[in-house]
Image: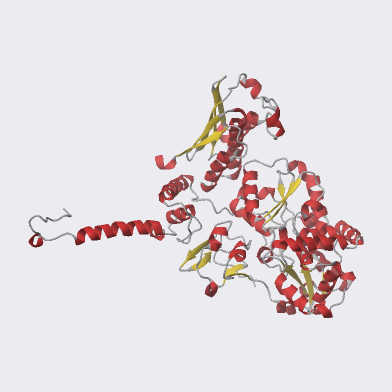
Amino acid sequence: MDGQLIQMEFPVKGGNFGGAGDAASKIKNILKQLGIRYEIIKRVAIASYEAEMNIVAHAAEGTIVVEINPNAVVVAAKDKGPGIPDIDLAMKEGFSTASQQIREMGFGAGMGLPNIKKATDDMTIKTEVGVGTELTFKIFLTDNREETLK
Amino acid sequence: MNRAGNSGYYHSVRLEEEKCQGCTHCIRTCPTEAIRVRNGKAKIIDERCIDCGECIRTCPNSAKITTTDPLDSIKTFKYKVAIPAPSFSGQFSRKYMLDKALFGFMLLGFDEVMEVAFGASIMAKAITQYLHDHGAELPRPMISSACPAVVRLIQVKFPGLVGNIIPLESPMEITARYARRKIAEMQGIPDSDIGVFFITPCPAKVTAVKQPVAAETSAVNGVISMTEMVNQIKKHFSSLRSLEELQKAPGMGIGWGRRDGEVESVDIPNKMAVDGIQHVSKLLEKIEAGGFRNIRFIEAQACVGGCVGGVLTVENPFLAKLKVDLVSDAVDKANDGLAEKVYTEFKESDFLFSQEIQPRPILTLDADVGKAMEKLKKIDEIHAELPGIDCGACGCPNCRAFAADVVNGLASRMDCHFDLRERVTGLAQEIFALAKKLPHTMQEKGNPDETK
């Protein structure tokens, strides 16, 4: 049923810390209108916020594409950025390539990707150094996490 | 006394219909989009209203009012206690004037007066201790429960954050409980004879007493408007004595009458204050998205300037802030010791809410996710066709809310003047075309029916 599928796209501007979190906030507000459980909304909000921040902090520009169906929300954060040379290293808590300037603003703690991984049911990263990164994650809306992971 | 509507929710904010002009000021400033203009009158939606008083502030015709208990209602109790809010101090310029004002309560028929600022300094210690003892297992940031409008804003618009509200009673409640206990113990007066009356700066506190969110009932029996009390006291001001011993609250508690009072008195690192319901909304929005996790305590107040900005205060809020500062600086330092002593008489369980605060989400479009999605899409479709200037002429706060009302069957597309105008234009063109249509007998050569 296409009446039960919501798709949206939000452009994200690199370096624009003032507007950072806008896309995550909009996604969160849609889920609130849909009556999704708060614990799930929280996880979607945290993961989308971190994904959005990654674009803002590292890339020149990007987009957040969201797809919501009654069972799951899928978010794809695509950017034209530096790419990730070593995904395993990037997944380590506390590892960050963020500049000193960005750290001084309170970002770049190296928790972005690990936090997304923790908050979501599925996460994949496609990346090419010098070209960009596409991070996709999925969070189930209906069942609770433990059951869906089995 | 407790008049709850069909929805089951009590509201102190009401409309005086005959004064309402049906203008659209209130519908647009309401932080929960709880008002619609229907049949030329503002209608408050019970489920959405949080009694913050923004509509009272904004109404140019004073049609929005706060329902409070009349001063006469104290007569139903044998022993009458007034507990004025900390912002009461901001209505008087000097400490000796506050002393006189407190004596004024006795003159007006009360047997005792106890400042809620006293309870505030006890709560400052209780909050500090609570955050200290439970910090590790609590979500961050924790938000003060002192402003009932903020608590209700969280319940309806940010239900995911109810767990971030500090589950401790308000200074008003603690002051009332302490007063009841002390009077019963010291004077042997039965509890049912004691009437505790809160002197309120705002409608939200009235609702907090008539329908508490985290307890069956309040220890407060009635709520009297601060405006009414200040007016009465000022009328008798020249005949009042300055009874210093009535003023028992420490300066720190008096500070709760204005913004920053809580932050200054709660001894915890990484704390901040936010005031004004729109700013509070924006902050909650960010917290909900996972922000502000380094902050441990947030003082959030619906009124600009804090409680001195409440719609039932008399003094200009910004001047009242200065007055609070002057009075709290002049207060006897010995009061600190008394509050300290009383604090030790309480256990943590005395401060804790007796019930959990429940979410009351108003944004959910349908209980079924699939149906909610269909509704959301319809709302988006309708919204895209609307002029988007949020004129309010349809009686809804903005085009988006109108689209939602249409989808929920609460408004008709024809309620939009622009839509209506377009349809009338189309209709007029059709009429014009029809008017030019001629029967064959009337058609002349060289002047055929142009409408064909």
Q: Along the horizontal axis of the image, is B45 left or right of B385?
A: right
Residue B73 on image: x %, y %: 71, 77
When asked about the image quadrant of residue B135, the answer is top right
| Vertical arrangement, residue A123 with respect to residue B54, above or below | above
Residue A88 on image: x %, y %: 63, 21
Q: Residue at x 83, y 80 (%)?
A: B239
Q: Is residue B339 visible?
A: yes
Q: Along the horizontal axis of the image, is B158 left or right of B247?
A: left
**Which residue sits furthest front?**
B446
When asked about the image quadrant of residue B82, the answer is bottom right
Q: Along the horizontal axis of the image, is A70 left or right of B146?
A: left
Query: Looking at the image, what colour scheme do you see?
Result: secondary structure
Total labels drawn: 0
| Vertical arrangement, residue B389 with respect to residue A2, above or below | below
Q: Residue at x 40, y 40 (%)?
A: A2
Q: Residue at x 66, y 21 (%)?
A: A89
Q: Is residue A76 visible?
A: no
| Vertical arrangement, residue B398 with respect to residue B194, above or below | above
When asked about the image quadrant of residue B9, the answer is bottom right
Residue B343 on image: x %, y %: 85, 57
Q: Along the horizontal axis of the image, is B432 left or right of B249?
A: left
Residue B62 on image: x %, y %: 59, 70
Q: Name the one closer to the observer, B393 or B365.
A: B393
Q: Name the one closer to the observer, B142 or B446.
A: B446
Q: Quadrant of the N terminus of chain B?
A: bottom right
| Vertical arrangement, residue A68 with respect to residue B130, above or below | above
